[in-house]
Image (spheres, coloured by chain):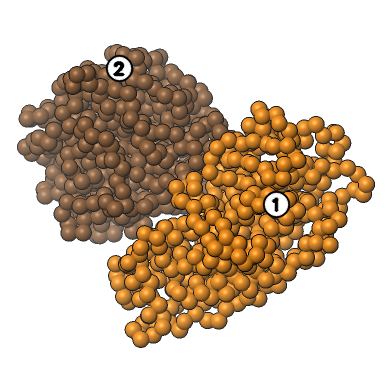
């Protein structure tokens, strides 16, 4: 797994079903000399770098990160499925994905080499804009890790496998070009934006110059993956705006104010555990990807199951952000920070930094609902687990009785954090459940 | 003679200045080549940060010479041979400071012998370079019991703790440069205090203390944020590399283990790409504000004083946006992407009596999400306390990748010049040729024996009922500092009163000084006029 808890890296023989890959030392493979990495180890190593790059690339706000995880999921899946007769391609199942290259009939391929080449070129494709340290890390991994993957392979097998992996990524990249989201100018903040009139609508919540316009207002029109379109899982209108003390809107705001004023240590811990801030974490989508890796390792899942899970999870969290953003900009609802300070408590200070975009629905709720739907279908509805995603950031693991319990906690964390009203988190989960259904409907087995 | 006639700028100096009126722009001419400055901060990944410049008088002639870090190239020392009031002139000279892998340097008189020493930050080790006279230096690590450790050194500050005759040095280090994926590998910051034997202070350093947790600082500054008499260590950390990190401030009490201020004590959670620190009492409150450079929005942090009295907690609010100094994007060159700030420094470049702000800008390398054309900022203060960009009008627009800088009066003309170190490109020196400058005064506070430059003290200048003040510090900026005259603009005023609040808390009487002159200030003595030779 991409174990972000520190330690040294090892590459184990391909026969091991559970790779033990640790952060930051993929070069140790050279010293260990214990054999070629398995496809599972390749998946781990490559995703480890991707998770770091998401955290350290400025344009990778949560929606943008989810898009990358979707394409990486598809690439990893197709790299594996293309070599097996028991797995079905996603061609024709994902929007506008009409064709992908096929392998040469009867020719020998090495699965680890195909996967490594595909994910390596995908990393360079999607993180071309990362900073000097990311560029250096990509270069080092290709220089030091890839040779261990192809070591001892017949030259023609290595070349054929790598060529196929690269061709596959090139084809997925062409498909990705069609969604119009390759370039994210100004980190996603429009240079000009006309705010909607009326106190019910979003207003900037910080004095950060860049964030005087909201993040990615057009993201709801992004091409979806498994979900038919951005509005497929649209939600009813938010609570009717009112400053009357008897109104539901006021009461929900009062509830946020009261809750934030009396947070328990447990509630603070929950808010921070799921904060998943851009450029300080792997983002909400990356958090669920980390959970998937932790569980895949714990259960010793084989590569076919791992890539199946990562594809569905990547696709659904991306669709969830599109659905959520479509609804957010349909209503452009005011944040608690603005409303509470204006109408209830001028000194109201949320625990979490209020994100620079409209309130309704809660993005973390929508995508956590979608992720829970996928993970529940995959592992079952009674799967208890421990989430240790944030150990390196000093946050202790949290235990959950099942995925919906985790998703509900993730959603509620935004309420504790003082950045969402109750309706936004409850309906966000509903929206996520709807979105997740489409990823669950993908056919991956023949 | 450049002087006078910026008469309507400063609030207290003119009753006619409107609240938001823009000040007349300054003007500079780029003269690096003509002045003899030929230097560049070179290198790849390990030199993406740093590029500092130290400005200091090592010839006892009042003129600030400069040491410019070279990264992969050797550092270069340029002796200042300017004629007073003439064009800035420098001579490349062998000094003993021609070290490789230099990230930055700060001047400081460690041993109190009256010869300026240099603290040199390098990729690999720290060098304490003792001044031996006539702008020559030698390594004194062994002589001063200084145990350098292997790291990527990127930040420094110094103070003299209460009753100590030997300085306390704080060093910040960056990531573990041996890692291919160095995120989350911030190495240890270290604090070197004076050594003691049998309770007796020694003229050398004790083994260092670890300032843990460490979060990849690019600047640090000992500063007395609450005027307690015991400076704290403010650290600007680069969020690109830490995990679980944030901005930091350590409280130092003599003889006690450093204490990291916590949220429970009022410290606010702030996570930025902290790269440089500049401080100045902009509000006239007696408490310094801190300008912290970053990527996109820059921060101007003012201590919270709900009742208007002394700050109760180390709680700071960002007032940068309202003051016009957030400067997230380039103002020239047409690049709409966010900028990247490095060295910052407050100086009054028109002698208006209102301090201005310079920010060195430049892409980290070739980061596509950030501006490639990212000109340095010159933010001129208006009478209402807001700032307006005038880098373009001032003639200092440059699209090089700036890093360190030093704003100083290199030719003893009374006007502040700007020296900027660029990454993989020649350094630039902008000579201040603003017409009709206001009056000025330049001051040095000096002590005998130890802490000769009165670090930790304050110089205050009063015109009418308005006081400008400057904390005397070593540290901050980006990878470099100045130990030279403290410059104040006077606007149209021809006289002022000055006093020093000395590091031991002694407050001198106000004493009159004439404009357009240099003075040396000693405890309990009348200001001594200094005339350039």
Q: Determine the residue positioned at 90% across, 48% down.
A: A104
Q: Which class describes the residues within 10 Å of circle 1: few (<14), some (14-19), or many (20+)?
A: some
Q: Return the chain for callout 1.
A: A
Percent position of residue A434, x then y: 63, 74
Where A205 sits versus B276, above or below? below
Could you tell me if residue A272 is visible in this image?
Answer: yes
Check the image and name the residue furthest to the right. Answer: A106
- Which quarter of the image is occupied by the C terminus of chain B? top left
Q: Where A105 falls versus A383 (above or below)?
A: above
- Dividing the image into 4 quarters, which one contains the N terminus of chain B? top left
Give the class, few, some or many, for how many residues have Cα within 10 Å of label 2's Cα (few <14, many ≥20). some
Q: CA distance from mark 2 to mark 1?
A: 59 Å
Q: Is residue A331 left or right of residue B256?
A: right
Horizontally, residue A63 falls left or right of residue B502, namely right
x and y percent of residue A133 in the render? 56, 39
> What's the residue at 33%, 72% (across, down)?
A258
Colour orange maps to chain = A
Which residue was labeled with disc 2? B144
Chain shown brown: that is B
**Depth order, front residue of B66/B290:** B290
Residue A345 picture location, percent across and down: 30, 72
Quadrant in the rendering for residue B75: top left
User: Does any portion of residue B70 appear in the rendered image?
Assistant: no
Which residue is more in the foreground, B188 or A181? B188
Up the image or down, A273 lies above or below A2; here it is: below
Q: Which residue is mark 1?
A: A301
Give the label on residue A420, or none: none
2 and 1 marks on the same chain: no
């Amino acid at each position: 797994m991409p174990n972000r808890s520190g330690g040294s890296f090892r590459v184990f023989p391909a026969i091991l079903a559970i790779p033990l890959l640790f952060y930051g030392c993929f070069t140790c493979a050279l010293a260990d000399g214990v054999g070629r990495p398995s496809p599972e180890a390749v998946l781990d190593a490559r995703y480890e770098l991707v998770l770091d790059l998401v955290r350290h690339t400025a344009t990778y706000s949560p929606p943008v990160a989810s898009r990358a995880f979707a394409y990486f999921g598809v690439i990893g899946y197709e790299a594996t499925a293309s070599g097996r007769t028991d797995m079905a391609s996603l061609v024709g199942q994902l929007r506008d994905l009409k064709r992908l290259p096929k392998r040469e009939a009867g020719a020998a391929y090495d699965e680890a080499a195909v996967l490594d080449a595909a994910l390596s070129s995908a990393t360079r494709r999607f993180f071309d804009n990362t900073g000097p340290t990311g560029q250096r890390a990509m270069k080092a991994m290709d220089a030091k890790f890839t040779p261990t993957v192809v070591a001892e392979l017949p030259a023609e097998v290595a070349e054929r496998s790598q060529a196929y992996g690269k061709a596959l990524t090139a084809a997925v990249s062409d498909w990705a070009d069609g969604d119009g989201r390759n370039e994210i100018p100004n980190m996603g903040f429009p240079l000009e934006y006309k705010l909607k009139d009326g106190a019910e609508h979003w207003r900037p919540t910080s004095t950060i110059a860049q964030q005087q316009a909201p993040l990615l207002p057009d993201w709801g029109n992004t091409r979806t993956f498994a979900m038919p379109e951005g509005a497929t899982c649209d939600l009813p209108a938010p609570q009717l705006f009112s400053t009357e003390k008897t109104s539901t809107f006021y009461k929900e705001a009062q509830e946020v104010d009261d809750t934030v004023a009396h947070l328990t240590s447990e509630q603070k811990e929950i808010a921070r555990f799921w904060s998943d801030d851009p450029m300080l974490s792997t983002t909400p989508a990356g958090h669920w990807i980390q959970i998937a890796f932790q569980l895949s390792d714990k259960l010793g899942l084989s590569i076919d199951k791992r890539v199946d899970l990562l594809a569905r999870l990547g696709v659904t969290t991306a669709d969830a952000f599109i659905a959520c953003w479509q609804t957010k900009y349909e209503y452009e609802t005011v944040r608690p920070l603005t409303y509470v300070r204006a109408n209830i408590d001028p000194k109201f200070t949320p625990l979490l930094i209020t994100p620079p975009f409209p309130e309704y629905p809660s993005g973390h709720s929508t995508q956590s609902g979608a992720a829970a739907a996928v993970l529940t279908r995959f592992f079952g509805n009674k799967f208890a687990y421990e989430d240790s995603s944030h150990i390196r950031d000093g946050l202790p693991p949290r235990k959950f009785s099942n995925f919906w319990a985790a998703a509900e906690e993730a959603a509620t964390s935004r309420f504790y954090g003082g950045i969402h009203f109750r309706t936004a988190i409850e309906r966000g989960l509903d929206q996520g459940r709807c979105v997740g259904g489409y990823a669950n409907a993908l056919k991956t087995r023949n | 003679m450049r002087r006078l006639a910026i008469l309507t700028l400063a609030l207290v100096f003119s009753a006619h200045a409107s609240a938001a009126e823009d000040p007349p722009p300054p003007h500079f001419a780029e003269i690096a080549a003509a002045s003899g400055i030929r230097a560049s901060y070179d290198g790849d990944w390990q030199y993406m940060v740093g590029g500092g410049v130290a400005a200091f008088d090592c010839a006892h002639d009042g003129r600030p010479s400069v040491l410019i870090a070279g990264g992969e190239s050797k550092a270069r020392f340029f002796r200042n041979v300017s004629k007073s009031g003439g064009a800035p002139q420098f001579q490349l000279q062998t000094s003993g400071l021609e070290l490789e892998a230099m990230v930055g340097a700060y001047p400081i008189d460690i041993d109190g012998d009256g010869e300026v020493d240099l603290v040199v930050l390098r990729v690999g080790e720290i060098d304490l370079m003792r001044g031996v006279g006539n702008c020559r230096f030698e390594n004194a690590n062994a002589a001063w019991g200084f145990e350098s450790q292997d790291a990527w050194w990127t930040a420094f500050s110094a103070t003299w703790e209460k009753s100590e005759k030997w300085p306390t040095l704080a060093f910040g280090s960056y990531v573990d440069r041996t890692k291919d994926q160095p995120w989350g590998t911030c190495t240890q910051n270290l604090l070197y205090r004076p050594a003691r034997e049998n309770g007796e202070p020694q003229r050398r350093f004790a083994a260092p203390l670890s300032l843990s947790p460490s979060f990849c600082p690019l600047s640090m500054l000992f500063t007395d944020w609450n005027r307690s008499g015991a400076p704290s260590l403010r650290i600007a950390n680069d969020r690109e590399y830490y995990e679980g990190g944030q901005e930091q401030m350590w409280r130092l009490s003599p003889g006690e283990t450093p204490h990291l201020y916590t949220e429970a004590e009022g410290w606010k959670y702030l996570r930025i790409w902290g790269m440089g620190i500049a401080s100045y009492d902009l509000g006239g409150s007696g408490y310094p504000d801190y300008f912290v450079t970053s990527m996109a929005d820059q921060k101007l942090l003012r201590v919270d004083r709900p009742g208007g009295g002394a700050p109760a907690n180390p709680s700071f609010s960002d007032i940068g946006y309202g003051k016009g100094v957030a400067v997230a994007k380039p103002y020239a060159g047409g690049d709409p992407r966010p900028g990247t700030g490095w060295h910052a420094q407050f100086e009054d470049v028109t002698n208006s009596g209102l301090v201005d702000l310079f920010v060195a800008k430049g892409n980290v390398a070739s980061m596509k999400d950030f501006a490639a054309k990212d000109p340095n900022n010159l933010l001129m203060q208006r009478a209402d306390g807001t700032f307006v960009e005038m880098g373009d009008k001032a003639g200092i627009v440059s699209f090089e990748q700036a890093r360190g800088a030093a704003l100083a009066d290199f030719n003893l003309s009374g006007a502040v010049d700007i020296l900027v170190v660029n990454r993989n490109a020649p350094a630039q020196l902008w000579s201040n040729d603003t017409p009709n400058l206001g009056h000025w005064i330049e001051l040095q506070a000096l002590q005998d024996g130890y802490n000769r430059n009165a670090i930790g003290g304050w110089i205050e200048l009063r015109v009418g009922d308005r006081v400008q003040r400057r904390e005397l510090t070593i540290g901050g900026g980006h990878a470099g500092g100045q130990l030279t005259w403290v410059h104040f603009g006077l606007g149209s005023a021809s006289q002022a009163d000055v006093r020093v609040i000395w590091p031991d808390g002694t407050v001198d009487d106000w004493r009159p000084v004439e404009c357009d002159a240099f003075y040396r200030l000693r405890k309990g003595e009348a200001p001594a006029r200094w005339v350039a030779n």
